[in-house]
Image (cartoon, helix red, strand yellow):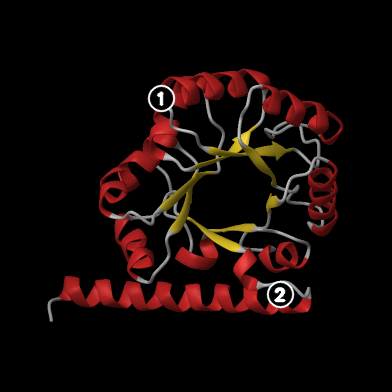
Amino acid sequence: MGRTAETELMIEAEIRQNLDVVRGRLRDAATRADRSPANITLVAISKSQPDERITAAFAAGQRVFGESRVQEAQTHWQARRDEAGDLELHLVGPLQTNKVKDAVGLFDVIQTLDRPKLAEHLAREFDRTGLIRRCFVQINTGEEPQKAGVTPDAADGFVEMCRGLELPVEGLMCIPPADQPAPPHFALLGAIAARNGLSRLSMGMSADYEAAAELGATHVRVGTGVFGARAARH
């Protein structure tokens, strides 16, 4: 066996084991909360990962992935998009309006709907192309000025506006402040979703996905827990 093939097998074994660990912990969290594990989707965050690690996760059976940047996602997924009919891609990073066309062409789910101008651009692109992408509204639960997202007190009005544009808003997403316990933010997101009749919650990352699962997450976004540390950007 050549060194390249041997390395590929080692990477695949590592990531398969990581996936088994994450899925097992999600099952345990769901059991503690009297939930079905089938109602929690693992979104493997593949941003900044080398191609061979993404290939390994795909070979290990993972089919739902998240990316933060449209251009990077195109290099990772454009070819795979044509090869795998069961692939599901989520945009989990900020979306600029000048990237809406590309994002709608590539992603199945936009998790970062966060402002009226973006909502209007998405609605126009959905109407123009007939490609209707599921949407999550990003809520800035910590009201951090450096972060994107609708503030909690503006969430109800924003969801109503999106519905007026006939956007398929199916849930909410949040990224809690790094210096605060995550569970209160997960609970807040759940309360906002409940009063707006939204059934899906994208919350929880590598450090706190178990708590998120116990508090009602339907989607958890796990990067390093699946792939290991991200490659450094230059």
Instruction: Tell me the amino acid under the disc marked 1.
Output: Thr
Q: Amino acid at mark 2?
A: Ala
Q: Nearer the viewer, residue 163 or 222?
A: 163
Q: Above or below — where is 21 with respect to 84? A: below
Farthest residue toward the left?
Answer: 2
Q: Nearer the viewer, residue 218 or 175?
A: 218
Secondary structure beneath dot 1 equals: helix
Q: Nearer the viewer, mark 1 or mark 2?
A: 1
Q: Quadrant of residue 71?
A: top left
Q: Residues within 10 Å of mark 2 (few under 14, many from 20)?
A: many
Is 101 left, or right, of 201 in this rendering?
left
> Residue at the location (78% across, 52% down)?
179
Residue that carries the numbered disc 1 in the rendered image: 129
Total numbered labels: 2
**Residue toward you, 62 or 55:** 62
What element does badge 2 sit on? helix
Name the quarter where the C terminus is drawn.
top left
Q: Position of residue 59 (x, y in %)?
A: 32, 68
Quarter assignment of residue 30: bottom right
Q: Residue at label 2?
A: 29
Residue 142 in the image: x percent, y percent? 81, 41
Q: Is residue 73 left or right of residue 66?
A: left
In percent of the image, x 66 and y 30: which residue is there? 114
Label 1, label 2: how many angstroms apart (C-alpha)? 40 Å
Is 175 above or below relative to 51? Answer: above
Residue 80 in the image, given as x and y percentages of width and height: 29, 51
